[in-house]
Amino acid sequence: MTETGSPDLDKKLASLLDVADALLRGEFTQEGVEIPDAEGLLPQLAKKINIMIVNLRNVEMPLSSASEAAPELVNRANSVAELMSQSTDEVLNKSDRLTELADSITHMLDNPEADCTEVVIGVKEKLNSMKAATYDIIASQSYQDVARQKMEGIIKDLTQLRDWLLEALIVLNIRKDGSEENVKKKVQLLQEVKETKTPELLKQDLVDDLLAEFGF
């Protein structure tokens, strides 16, 4: 995969986004404007990021599969997966412990020969243990919430990258077809990308359509 942090790539992306901003301001003219020749690079990047966004939004898709689309996020994704796995195991273990304690209390109460005082003391001890296990479960659930927040952060970052590359693809399309009709159409697309109220599914459709125009 191409290094996304290379100076040459950063320069090309910055140039493309400048053209996109000029389009939105109505200041774009093809004379004197050099649009970088990056058709072979940006569609590949957009496709990989698009695949990973789709995978991350699918809760049943393994993180390992999603990570294959963007190796630079493997460590972050793996840390989220590990955190969620640890907290899930903790909840399951403590739930088993609660079941054991409840069974023990039931057995103590069902024993007709047991001394009442001893039963009361024993039940109190079991209840204290159950309370501690419950607190542990609550704590584990908070770890899962942290993992969820981390995953949301990854999706947010990727979505921003997707939107930037979407703008770049629109500009590159104008490089292929600079007709007034196509420019107007692409300006409208840019406005939809910039609009925060545009549904994510619609943006996803825009990505798919633009990638199709480049043969992907």
Image (cartoon, grey):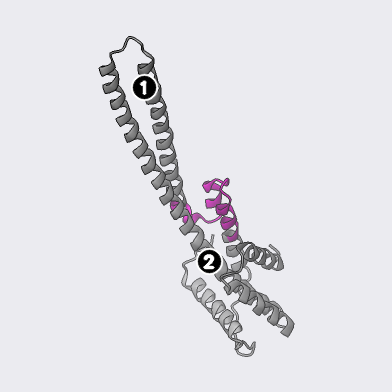
Q: Is residue 183 left or right of residue 116?
A: right
The amino acid type found where label 1 is placed reads: Ile
Q: Quadrant of the C terminus?
A: bottom right
Q: Is residue 30 visible?
A: yes
> Principal SS element in the magenta part?
helix
The answer to whether residue 84 is magenta is no
Residue highlighted by disc 1 = 105
**Along the viewing direction, whichever of 168 and 155 lies nearer the viewer:** 155
Could one spot residue 41 in this view of the protein? no
Pinpoint residue 127: horizontal percent, then vertical percent: 32, 29
Place of residue 21 in the rendered image (x, y in percent of width and height, measured from the top left): 56, 81
Give the image quarter of residue 196: bottom right
Does residue 91 appear to the left or right of 38 in the view shown?
left
Q: Give the residues drawn in magenta, as a range.
A: 50-76
Q: Is residue 131 above or below residue 157?
A: above
Marks 2 and 1, how far apart at CA: 56 Å
Residue 84, label in figure: none
Where is residue 31 shown, x and y percent of the image? 64, 90
Ranked by sequence position, the earlier of labels 2 and 1 is 1
Residue that label 2 marks: 161
Name the residue type under label 2: Leu
